[in-house]
Image (cartoon, rainbow, N blue to C red):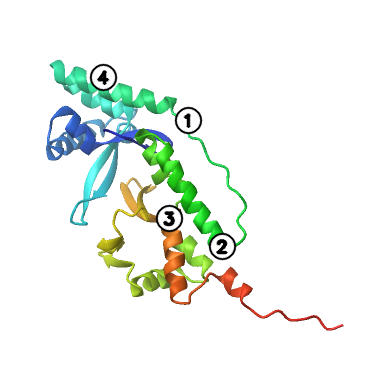
């Protein structure tokens, strides 16, 4: 089933999904889109980004490959190039997807007040899991990729009084992740557990989109439990372990 991704406030459809819908190889669709972008380039009124947004994905071998995110206008652009039954079916599919997307209402759960950091992490992880189960597939990007619960390693590192670089090395030390090129990726045994997600980040200089690795609340809880086993606690819990000093009258 196809799913839409909310990119910077607008729903988009992955070019890999579009290729399947129109019965064309992704390689050939990418070639066509690049030509469309080239044709649109000289126009002063139309920006290619209104139709096609550069992105990438990680393949089965862990390598990053290029793709595009198509806006509704981008799907219309592709649909207009198709003829006969194929064009009609594609138009019906993408119109239904975008219309259904606009009707969706994301319900945010209410959180109870946790008593300590361990409870807070567990509660956030449980709520994130429930939210994902409740939302239809079309909302996957909204609730997972752009979930406010997603955290960068820099944000988590601050809990431990460390820099992102130090924290990444710590996670590597304890067998959680390794570096592949310029990117940190999880070891294979942690794949598919919902600990991390790749979130597209658009550069301001029109150089395309870079996928940032972010941690879900489940992933944050996993890090907490793993580091705790090695005696490493967040700064707040470290202070809780300090002996109380009685005031002297």
> Along the polypeptide, which appears first: circle 3 or circle 4?
4
Give the residue pinned by disc 1: 105
Q: Return the disc, 2 or 4, that comes first in the chain's sequence.
A: 4
**Residue under pointer 3:** 218
Identify the residue position indicated by label 2 in the image. Answer: 117
- Give percent across and percent down for residue 175: 32, 71
Decide which of tag 2 and tag 1 comes sooner along the chain: 1
Above or below 246: residue 30 = above
Q: Percent x, y for residue 186?
A: 30, 62
Taking the spot 40% from the left edge, 33% from the top edge, the residue there is 10
Disc 1 secondary structure class: loop
Whether residues under marks 3 and 1 lie with C-beta atoms below 8 angstroms apart, the answer is no
Q: 65 or 173, which is in the foreground?
A: 173
| Placement of 8 over or under 195, stated as above or below | above
For label 2, the SS is helix
Seen from the viewer's position, the closer of residues 184 and 78 is: 184
- Upstream in sequence: badge 3 or badge 2: 2
Q: How many residues crowd around disc 4 within 10 Å: few (fewer than 14), some, or many (20 or more)?
A: few
Mark 2: few, some, or many residues within 10 Å (few <14, many ≥20)?
some
Tell me the quarter of the picture where residue 165 sits. bottom left
Q: Which mark is residue 55?
A: none
């Amino acid at each position: 089933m196809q799913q839409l991704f909310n990119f910077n406030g607008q729903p988009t459809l992955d070019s890999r999904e579009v290729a399947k819908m129109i019965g064309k190889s992704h390689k050939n669709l990418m070639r066509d889109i690049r030509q469309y972008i080239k044709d649109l380039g000289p126009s002063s009124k139309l920006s290619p980004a209104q139709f096609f947004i550069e992105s990438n994905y990680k393949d089965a071998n862990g390598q990053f490959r290029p793709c595009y995110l198509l806006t509704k206008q981008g799907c219309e652009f592709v649909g207009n190039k198709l003829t006969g039954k194929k064009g009609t079916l594609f138009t019906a599919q993408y119109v239904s997807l975008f219309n259904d997307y606009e009707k969706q209402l994301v319900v945010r759960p209410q959180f109870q007040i946790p008593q300590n950091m361990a409870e807070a992490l567990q509660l956030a992880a449980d709520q994130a899991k429930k939210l994902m189960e409740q939302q239809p597939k079309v909302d996957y990007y909204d609730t997972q990729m752009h979930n406010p619960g997603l955290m960068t390693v820099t944000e988590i590192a601050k809990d431990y009084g460390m820099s992102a670089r130090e924290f990444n090395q710590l996670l590597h030390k304890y067998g959680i992740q390794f570096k592949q090129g310029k990117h940190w990726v999880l070891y294979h045994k942690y794949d598919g557990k919902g600990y991390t997600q790749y979130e597209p980040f658009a550069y301001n200089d029109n150089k395309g989109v870079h996928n940032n690795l972010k941690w879900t609340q489940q992933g944050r809880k996993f890090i907490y439990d793993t580091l705790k086993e090695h005696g490493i606690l967040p700064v707040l819990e470290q202070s809780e372990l300090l002996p109380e000093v009685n005031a002297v009258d």
